[in-house]
Image (spheres, rainbow, N blue to C red):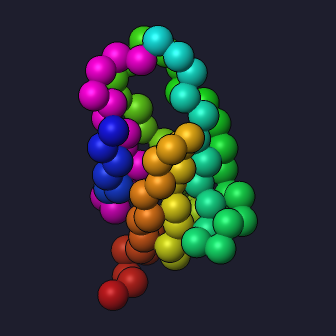
Amino acid sequence: MVVMYSQLTQEVRVVLSSITDEHITYRITTPDGQLIRQGRFVPGSQSYSVSTKGLPSGKYVFMTDGYKQPFEKRGMFDS
């Protein structure tokens, strides 16, 4: 699994090594564990996007069962 964050589109992009046959549950939390968003990826695809629009600038963690990837969302004028 590869997880990338795009500042331009404000999306977490998830690419799996193969097409999944199972639902994958994901969560976006703050670094201290506060749940921000959660959802499920529907089987049948190899790549997914999760929007972070509406979230304030800051540090977050994208998680699935057994996978954790920190990312930082920056506003257009953040340095």
Say which quarter of the image contains residue 7.
bottom left
Tell whether position 13 is magenta. yes
Measuring 32% from the left and 52% from the top, which residue is drawn there?
4
Tell whether position 77 is magenta. no
Q: Is residue 46 above or below residue 54?
A: above
Q: Nearer the viewer, residue 5 or 55?
A: 5
Residue 77, percent from left and from top:
37, 82
Which residue reaches farthest right? 34
Name the chief secondary structure element in magenta. loop
Measuring 36% from the left and 43% from the top, which residue is drawn there?
13
Measuring 33% from the left and 87% from the top, which residue is drawn there?
79
Say which quarter of the image contains residue 76.
bottom left
Residue 12, percent from left and from top:
41, 49
Report if residue 60 is visible in the image. yes
Q: Nearer the viewer, residue 35 or 6?
A: 35
Residue 18 is left or right of residue 56, and the answer is left
Residue 50, percent from left and from top:
48, 42
Report if residue 57 is visible in the image. no
Residue 20, percent from left and from top:
42, 17
Residue 39 is left or right of residue 4, and the answer is right
**Boundaries of the magenta span:** 7-20
Measuring 53% from the left and 66% from the top, which residue is drawn there?
60
